[in-house]
């Protein structure tokens, strides 16, 4: 369902569905990755990063797979400079921990 909503660019509905999936305890890493890719493909960089940040709210561990998904999604839609800046920011944040 998330794939269909993403392709149809029904982003508000996608976020509502994401919340409903969480309420049912069915939220997975793949769900977040689908949302990240959909926002990136629509050139919605800030919203893609917002979904990435939302993972923390839902207590999902931000790891190499999710960081790679976000950066690769941004790169694919020609947002390479933004991906590089985000990578540098994440790297700084990880060094503080």
Image (tube, grey):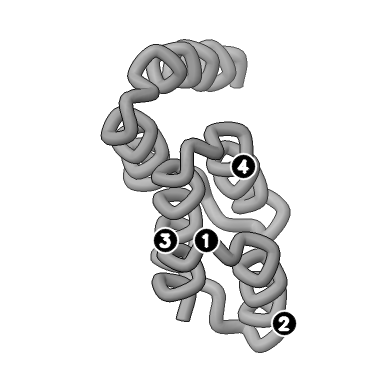
The residue carrying mark 3 is 34
**Between marks 4 and 3, how big is the CA–CA gap?**
13 Å
Helix, strand or loop at mark 2:
helix
Rendering coords of residue 62 (x, y %): 50, 44
- Judge from the rendering whether residue 64 lies leftward or rightward of residue 57; answer left or right: left
Rendering coords of residue 60 (x, y %): 56, 56
User: Closer to the camera: disc 4 or disc 2?
Assistant: 4
Do the numbered discs 4 and 2 sit on residues whose CB atoms are within 8 Å? no
Q: Which residue appears at 61% of the width and 60% of the height? A: 11
**Between marks 4 and 2, how big is the CA–CA gap?**
21 Å
Between 36 and 91, the residue placed more toward the observer is 36
Between 48 and 32, the residue placed more toward the observer is 48
Helix, strand or loop at mark 3:
helix
Q: Which residue appears at 42% of the width and 61% of the height? A: 34
**Please, is residue 4 above or below residue 51 in the view?**
below
The residue carrying mark 1 is 9
**Which quadrant does the C terminus fall into?**
top right
**Between marks 1 and 4, how big is the CA–CA gap?**
12 Å
Give the mark nearer the N terminus: 3 vs 2: 2
Q: Residue furthest bottom?
A: 24
Between 89 and 9, the residue placed more toward the observer is 9
The residue carrying mark 2 is 23
Rendering coords of residue 66 (x, y %): 40, 45
The residue carrying mark 4 is 47
- Judge from the rendering whether residue 75 lies leftward or rightward of residue 96; answer left or right: left
Helix, strand or loop at mark 1:
loop
Q: Which residue appears at 64% of the width and 76% of the height? A: 17
Q: Which residue appears at 39% of the width and 12% of the height? A: 81
**Please, is residue 12 above or below residue 85 in the view?**
below
Give the mark nearer the N terminus: 4 vs 2: 2
User: Closer to the camera: disc 3 or disc 2?
Assistant: 3
């Amino acid at each position: 369902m998330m794939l269909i909503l993403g392709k149809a660019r029904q982003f508000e509905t996608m976020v509502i569905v994401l919340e409903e999936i969480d309420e049912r305890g069915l939220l997975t890493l793949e769900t977040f990755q689908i949302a990240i890719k959909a926002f990136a493909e629509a050139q919605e960089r800030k919203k893609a990063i917002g979904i990435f940040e939302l993972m923390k709210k839902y207590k999902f561990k931000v790891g190499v797979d999710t960081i790679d998904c976000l950066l690769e999604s941004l790169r694919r839609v020609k947002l390479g400079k933004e991906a590089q800046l985000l990578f540098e920011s994440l790297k700084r944040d990880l060094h503080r921990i």
